[in-house]
Image (cartoon, grey):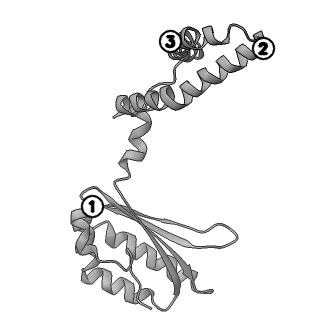
Amino acid sequence: MSLALSGKFDTGQLPRVAGAPVTITVARTVAPGFEAQYLQWTEDVVATLRTVHGCLGAGVLHPGPDGGEHQIVFRFVDGLSLREWERSKQREVLMANAESFVLSERVQRTVGVDDWFELPTRAEPKRPLWGRILTDVAWVFPVAVASSLLIGPHLASLNLAVRVVISTMAITAAMRVAIGPFRSRLRARRTL
């Protein structure tokens, strides 16, 4: 089995795709009885990674008390730095040292995760309930007035309950079909 710290893919394409930091998570299943060797190996990997140009950090996540996968998480400043690491002799030696006790691995790559942490600070604060109600009334009022002017005269001879049901259906349909999508587009443009 050929082991890789960041998976079996062509990292030569990463500089075009990954100008932002690249985070790699590798989950491995270790052969029973070889946990101590694996832990020593991970210490060597992390120590080596921390000296590599472009590495922003590395760490180890241990499985729970019931067992499971061992994980190494590391991050490079960009795809080019990751590619240099993947082609390095240091990495090749480390991977060869682990072949005897690693049974399987699962790799996940994430590019530019900084936005995950910055997005909440860019979100609009939640408006108070009274503000949301006033906004909804401001959108519904013109539709209700138009409904009263256009549909109301045709419903004058009908029972009150029937008039209310028909007016409510017309207003609701207008809000769903025309006003709702328009509001959504306005809201989307405002948050760009």
Say if mark 1 contacts mark 2, CB within 8 Å.
no
Identify the secondary structure beneath mark 2.
helix
Say which residue label 2 marks.
Answer: 161
Q: Residues within 10 Å of mark 1 (few under 14, many from 20)?
A: some
Residue type at mark 1: give it. Answer: Ala
Say which residue label 1 marks.
Answer: 18
Tell whether 38 sits left or right of 186.
right
Residue at image coords 44%, 86%: 98
Residue at image coords 24%, 71%: 13
* Residue 111 found in image quarter: bottom left
Relative to residue 191, is residue 141 depicted above or below? above
How many angstroms separate mark 3 from mark 2 (CA)? 22 Å
Q: Is residue 84 visible?
A: yes
Identify the secondary structure beneath mark 3.
helix
Residue type at mark 2: give it. Answer: Ala
Say which residue label 3 marks.
Answer: 142
Q: Position of residue 85 (x, y in %)?
A: 26, 74
Q: Position of residue 174 (x, y in %)?
A: 54, 25
